[in-house]
Image (cartoon, rainbow, N blue to C red):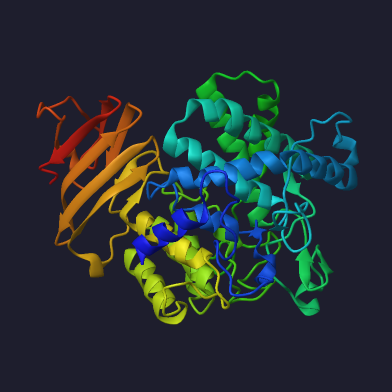
Amino acid sequence: MFQYGRYLLISSSREKSLPANLQGAWSQDFYTPWSGGFWHNINVQMNYWGSMSTNLAECFEAYIGFFEAYLPIAQQHATDYVRKHNPSQLNKGDDNGWIIGTGANAYYIPSAGGHSGPGTGGFTAKLLVDYYQFTQDQEYLEEVAYPAMLSLSKFYSKVLVPHDDLLLVEPSASPEQTATPEQAEGMPGHMKGNNYITAGCTFDQGFVWESFSDTLAMADTLGSEDPFLDTIREQITQLDPILIGADGQIKEYREENHYSDIGQERHRHISHLCPLYPGTLINSEHADWMQAASKTLNLRGNKTTGWALAHRMNCRARLGEGDQAHEAYQRFIIERTATNLWALHPPFQIDGSLGTMAGVAEMLLQSHDDAIKILPALPKAWNTGHFDGLVARGNFVISAKWKDGQATELSILSRSGGECRIAYPGIGKAIVTDSSGDEIKVTRDGKDRIIFASIAAETYSLKSIQ
């Protein structure tokens, strides 16, 4: 199933092609479901979540080309959006950033709004950031990624609205979540059709935080001194993006108290957990947020669509809950997979196949949290095994063997050089050698982490891990 996902991505997203759409490159119908489009409130992102970690970064180049092609339209959408929602912040030139909404296709690029808030732009931009972090392509950083992130941050800076001491996205919506009039009664938001529109939902606040944070990190890498950076350095402290409710859940909406006070309790989207995955805001430094994210997944449940199971699988992996991630994977295969291994929404959508491919990689290797974590969410069912050629941020290619749940050997190819940080229980005792068999100097940060300087194109071996 994992390797088939890689095949599907290779087949659907090639140099100078359109990106993989909802059906990849296949459809039984002349008119494909949902226009065969690029849906930017999770689906097109899920198509590419695993491209970098499974050593297929070149497959994402199709989306980079698509982004560069639609950017002028996205910039005009940003200007129109600011003019409509926060006209006092409008720059009468062209420097209002860019934004994209949900239902794009090869012929149409929407603006943000409706049932999904402007967090769709940050959701998309996370892929642009990941491509740099995994490939370390400096030319791409300078010419594409950093300008894109700086521009998006300018847009977000203009649509944040003061609410006492906070800055909230307004209007704001959690993708495709619906509410009843009874749920909305007495709440500060309002209904637009079946959708609840409010200020500062977690999806939007989280992706503003992610975009600001990534912009600042890239600026530091490049030594940029753009004066606008001081604005987002201040604004990022006023976002308050993650709140925990009375039931121990991550709130989807700021005004909710108990879980599902607003919205469907078993909804397929878990947009308020995007700061956990694919975002990085909810991480091991915030144990309370991690616990609340786990509780939210328990409350949401696994009775859902194919792609939604894939998102749950990745979130469980980020939490280090290997058995729960494996359970979601099993359910996906049993309940939401056709006989040819295509994923069923239903109908057929390729995002589930590609999303679970990413989930397998996330269970075996993570690199978003200040170190490369080996086997961070290994389920009991995978007690003994190996993987070869997964990629970590920093452009490190990792291979590993384990037996009885314990890593026995690691191999690390450093494709770009630079500092390598490896985290695994007991790895502080490991011996690291280069391709000549010479032991290299390492810094042992406690018993569970080592750090060493790597040379580009050199391969390192780790043994005696315990």
Residue 370 % position (x, y): 39, 38
Residue 397 % position (x, y): 30, 41
| Left/right of residue 260 with respect to residue 79 in the rendered view | left
Quadrant of residue 250 within the rendered picture: bottom right
Q: Is residue 331 above or below residue 420?
A: below
Question: Which of these two is toward me, 430 or 46?
Answer: 46
Q: Which residue is at 35% across, 44% downward?
A: 391
Question: Which of these two is toward me, 325 or 73?
Answer: 73
Question: Which of these two is toward me, 60 or 172?
Answer: 60
Q: Which residue is at 16% across, 26% downward?
A: 440
Q: Is residue 450 above or below residue 120?
A: above
Q: Which residue is at 45% across, 81% downward?
A: 335
Q: Is residue 352 visible?
A: yes
Specify the quadrant that holds the N terminus.
Answer: bottom left
Q: Is residue 141 above or below residue 18?
A: above
Residue 230 % position (x, y): 67, 25
Q: Is residue 127 visible?
A: no
Quadrant of residue 209 within the rendered picture: top right
Q: Is residue 5 above or below residue 260?
A: above
Residue 334 % position (x, y): 40, 80
Q: So how many labels did they put on this image? A: 0
Quadrant of residue 44 within the rendered picture: bottom right
| Left/right of residue 303 with respect to residue 439 in the rendered view | right
| Left/right of residue 223 with respect to residue 433 in the rendered view | right
Q: Which residue is at 78% across, 79% downward?
A: 182
Find the residue positioned furthest to the front: 30
